[in-house]
Image: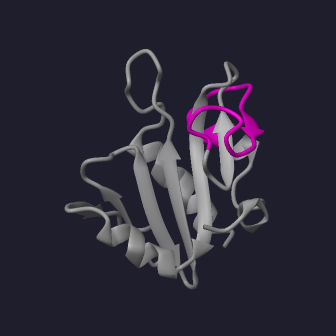
Amino acid sequence: MAGRAHAANELTIADVEAVSGLTGVALVGKREVPGAGGDLNFVRADRKLLLIVNVADASNYATAKQQFDKITAVPGIGDEAFTPDAFAWVLYGRKGGRFFGLGSGLDPASGNPILSQAQLQRLGKLIVGRI
């Protein structure tokens, strides 16, 4: 997918803090913490992965969609969006010629997503407003 500059303005620390309700959120580079493989990688104050963001060409949307057996369409986000049924902590979307993918970090203690699907959708709406 596209490099960091491709996603640099799509989501900010302030956006992520406002939606998540957390403070002390920071951006880290790829592979700086376990799981940080996105164009943008947000961590909590304890440096545990909170959110991965990828932004790329819209052709990546069809590729992402084909990787999952079952998906649920998510209306109202860009031209089209979906979440894979088996991975409720992920959201993919497309607006015009741009694609985005969001993934919540998983809580190390419980294994549960840190961000809810509703929170991912709020972040997705912010992204489509900027791409």
Residue 9 is situated, as x and y percent measured from the top left of the image, at 77, 61
At 51% from the left edge and 60% from the top edge, which residue is drawn? 101
Q: Is residue 51 visible?
A: yes
Front residue of 91 and 28? 28
Front residue of 75 and 115? 115
Front residue of 12 and 103? 103
At 43% from the left edge and 15% from the top edge, which residue is drawn? 109
Residue 26 is situated, as x and y percent measured from the top left of the image, at 75, 34
Residue that extends furthest to the left in the rendered view of this protein: 70
* Extent of the magenta region: 16-36
Our reading of the magenta stretch's main secondary structure is loop
Quadrant location of residue 10?
Answer: bottom right
On-image quarter of the C terminus: bottom right
At 39% from the left edge and 77% from the top edge, which residue is drawn? 62
Q: Is residue 40 magenta?
A: no
Q: Is residue 78 visible?
A: no
Q: How many marks?
A: 0
**As drawn, 106 above or below 52:** above
